[in-house]
Amino acid sequence: HLAGLEPGFDLPALPGMSLSEVQTPALILDLDALARNLRRMSTFVATHGMKLRVHGKMHRSVDVYRLQEQIGGASGICCQKVSEAEVFARAGVKDILISNEVRDPRMIDRLAQLPRFGGRVAVCVDAPGAVADLAQAVARHGYPLDVLVEYDSGAGRCGVQGADAAVALAQAITAAEGLRYAGLQSYQGSVQHLTEFNSRRAAAAEAILRTAEVIDALKAAGLPPETVTGAGTGSYTFETSSGIYTELQCGSYAFMDADYGRVLDIEGRRFDEGLWENALFVLTQVISTAKPGQAVTDAGLKSLTMESGLPLVFGRPGLTCTGVSDEHSQIRDPEGVLRIGERLRLVPGHCDPTCNLHDWYVGLRGDQVEVLWPVSARGRSY
Ligand code: PLP
Ligand code: MN
């Protein structure tokens, strides 16, 4: 699929090139570090009997998902958007949950057609109107859909606000022709990046308690949820030990980023010191050293996002990124060690939106390019 494409114009590199030949800025993956992250999570879910439904919004890559299936213990994917899910469905992914609300009529219509690619498709709802709209679309297209009630366990985003509303929705799904009541989603997003372990555990415990109350109400109404899904990289150990979740939706653990790197584990160690490895980098090179004590590189906001803070300069303790503008990063270099053309690996603040800025992943084995993988669902935010 790379025939006729020219490095530096159509794509950042070709397989077989050395790292020094990769055009910058480029989104690069350390394939060995990625494999170790995937195996670690695979061991965890196997040990604890959890289903791992990795979050595809993080990488938006069919190839990365395939690897998560092969060596990472994944047996399903989450998507946030219908158009994103369509990319994975077309590629043959057989178990897709849209872990989000879909309310636009055109998108509901597309969603109802997704099972024609041969997989199981599920979606979340938080309002009776959504159940009615989904049922109508299913009647038009004839493919049954799985539907989960989404509960807001504290993130304050989507989700019904209480147990009574959850029960009423579960009843509405059960009563609707063509919809199968498949369980409960309770994802507490605002817990994930709490740095201190004890604060994170306490916030997760509160969300878990509230979720347990909803599950009890559903059971009392004769509607026990077969699946209880949620959790992210910052909290999945808590949902797992709660005993009430069946499924984890972790995304960022696979690549890591600077923001998750700062999060602390039970022993007070940073996530990026031993637990999860940085596998994702933006490769950049120095284009100016005109100002003493500073180097400027060629990766800016068009190559990495900044909503979670500045990138880290990987493996170079003397160097600090101090600013990022459209096409440049400023690197504080007090000793003046950096030279024009020197390459640096930046760890982006936030992996998901950074990946969505690029067309390609450059997969490296050591310092050699092994694969180019398209960011298959890039821009699919509809
Ligand atoms: N599930 C849902 C619904 C999410 O919105 C997210 C991320 O925001 C995740 C799971 C994955 O979280 P993480 O990347 O922190 O592992
Ligand atoms: Mn994220």
Image: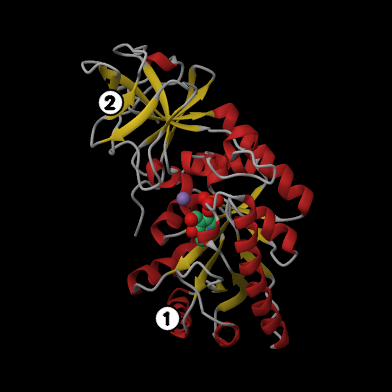
Q: Is residue 271 left or right of residue 344?
A: right
Q: Residue at x 36, y 53 (%)?
A: 380
Give the mark toward the camera: 2 or 1.
2
Between 181 and 271, which is closer to the camera in this rendering? 271
Residue 78 x, y percent position in the rendering: 53, 57
Could you say whether the residue bearing mark 1 is in a helix, strand or loop? helix
Q: Amino acid at mark 2?
A: Asp
Residue farthest along the left direction in this orientation: 290
The image quadrant that residue 301 belongs to is top left
Relative image position of residue 93 (x, y in whole percent) = 55, 52
Q: Examine the rendering and report whether any part of residue 215 can be seen.
A: yes
Q: Are the residues tagged 2 and 1 within 8 Å (C-beta)?
A: no
- Label 2 within 8 A of ligand 2 by Cβ: no
User: x and y percent of residue 67 in the render?
Assistant: 59, 39
From the viewer's perspective, tell me whether residue 209 is left or right of residue 378: right
- Callout 1 amino acid: Asp
In the rendered view, would you say 196 is above or below 191? above
Colouring of the image? secondary structure
Determine which quarter of the picture holds residue 120: bottom right
**Residue holding disc 2:** 298
Instruction: Give the residue displayed 72% in from the left and 82% down from the top.
Output: 219
In the rendered structure, find residue 133 and report the number of the disc placed on it: 1
Picture residue at 64% right of the left edge, 38% below the top: 269
**Quadrant of residue 141 within the rendered picture:** bottom left
Q: Is mark 1 within 8 Å of ligand 1?
A: no
- Residue 118 seen in the figure: no
Q: Residues within 10 Å of mark 1 (few under 14, many from 20)?
A: some
